[in-house]
Image: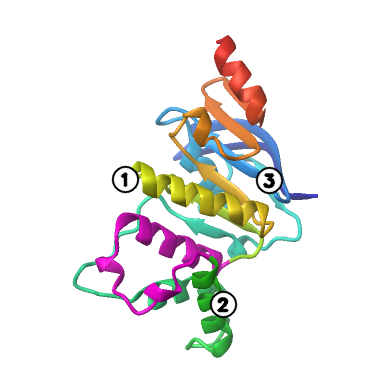
Amino acid sequence: MSLIEIKNLTLGYDKHIVLKNININIEENDFICIVGPNGSGKSTLVKGILGLIKPIKGKVIYNGLKQNFIGYMPQETKVDSNFPASVMEIVLSGTLNSLGFKSFYSKKEKDVAINNLKLLGIEKLKNKSFCDLSGGQRQKVLLARSLCATSKLLILDEPSNNLDSKSKKELYETIGELNRKNGITIIMITHDLDHNNLIGNKILSLREDDIFFGSVDDFIRRVHND
């Protein structure tokens, strides 16, 4: 079943077109890696899916999925070192879309946060200051926050940026398990084109006038034939 249908989608800024006539279906349990050179429109497409920018043409159709219940982990999340938020506070903020008219977190939101900390194996960090964590730990905390917003779809914008190889491997394993074991659909922007790190089942490759959307195996054969 399609979670999202993207039909003839053209996106840009101030009438400057970045992406033109994109047509893809995002299915339940997909794990899609979006690749392409700088300026190819990877982040622009994500903003279009999230509704942060309006289409110039075409549309994004959501099937059984509310736009504000998509978990999103942006490329960079700045936390002021003078505001030492705890891990629990950071993760809880991911439940804001479910608060409605409430002005405080209830047991329900706190349970969701704890469950996602447990899911990622970082419950022991809940009382630590986010600013005191390692890069790999921070990314897992931000991933837990994103999970608090959704049970269906996560969008990750280069989540392995600035991580060492060990932390990157651990993060990719965690994301893969969320897809395989928990049935969460993943869309991940990545610059990491090492074939061992193309961990999804599909690739969306964005190049000017050369859009590819298909299996990882077909993408690798295409790269080798170029």
* Magenta stretch: includes residue 145: yes
Q: Residue at x 31, y 45 (%)?
A: 162
As measured in the structure, the alpha-carbon distance from the residue carrying label 3 to the one carrying label 1 is 26 Å
Residue beneath label 1, please?
162
Q: Residue at x 59, y 10 (%)?
A: 225
x, y percent for residue 54: 55, 48
Determine the secondary structure under disc 3: loop
Residue beneath label 2, please?
112
Total tally of numbered discs in the picture:
3
Mark 1 belongs to which amino acid?
Answer: Asn
Determine the secondary structure under disc 2: helix
Q: Classify 10 Å Cα crowding around label 2: few (below 14), some (14-19), many (20 and above).
A: many
Mark 2 belongs to which amino acid?
Answer: Val
- The correct choice, above or below, for 26 with respect to 35 in the image is below
- Per the rendered image, the range of residues in magenta is 120-149
As measured in the structure, the alpha-carbon distance from the residue carrying label 3 to the one carrying label 2 is 24 Å
Mark 3 belongs to which amino acid?
Answer: Asp
Earlier residue among tags 3 and 2: 3
* Magenta stretch: includes residue 103: no
Residue beneath label 3, please?
30
Q: Classify 10 Å Cα crowding around label 3: few (below 14), some (14-19), many (20 and above).
A: many
Residues at circles 3 and 2 in contact by the CB criterion of under 8 Å: no
